[in-house]
Amino acid sequence: MKSAIDTAEKTHTTFDGFTGKPDPTPKEIKLKTADDVRLEMGKVYRDMRRGDIDMGDGTKLVYVLGQIGKVIELVEIEKRIELLERAKP
C-alpha cells in the first residue's frame, strides 16, 4: 500500500498564482552542459522580457542557473586537470 507521501510526490501539482488554476507540470529541463545552462538562461530572459515570468523570480532563476553553470565548469576543469596529471611521465 502506498503512503500518503509517495502519492503526494507523484501527484504534485503547481497552481497559477493569479488564476488559481493548475499549471501543467513543467517538462524536465536539460542542464548537463554549460551550453544547456546558457540556453535555459536565454529562455528565462525571454520569458521575463515578455512578462511571462516576474522579473524578481526570473532574476533568482538566472542566479541559480549561473551557480549550476559554475559547478559544471568546475567539474570540467577538475576532469581536465586529472587527465593532465595522469599523462605526466
Image (spheres, rainbow, N blue to C red):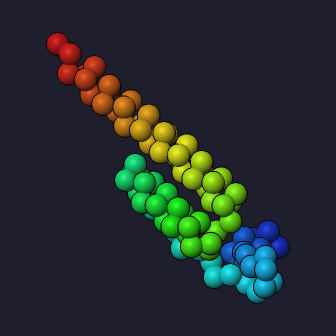
Q: Which residue is drawn at 36% across and 31% down?
A: 77
Q: Residue at x 51, y 67 (%)?
A: 46
Q: How many labels does the image show?
A: 0
Q: In which quarter of the image is residue 88?
A: top left
Is 12 situated left or right of 53 in this image?
Answer: right
- Which of the image's four quarters has the N terminus? bottom right
Q: Quick one: 10 or 22, which is closer to the camera? A: 22
Residue 29 visible? The answer is no
Q: Which residue is drawn at 43% across and 54% down?
A: 38
Q: Quick one: 12 or 22, which is closer to the camera? A: 22
Is 45 situated left or right of 2 in this image?
Answer: left
Q: In which quarter of the image is residue 61?
A: bottom right
- Which of the image's four quarters has the C terminus? top left
Q: Quick one: 63 or 87, which is closer to the camera? A: 63
Give percent across and percent down for residue 55.
66, 61
Residue 58 visible? The answer is yes
As displayed, is residue 5 above or below residue 34? below
Give percent across and percent down for residue 36.
41, 57
Q: In which quarter of the image is residue 13?
A: bottom right
As displayed, is residue 31 above or below residue 68? below
Give percent across and percent down for residue 15.
75, 78
Question: In this view, which residue lies farthest toward the top?
Answer: 89
As displayed, is residue 16 above or below residue 85? below
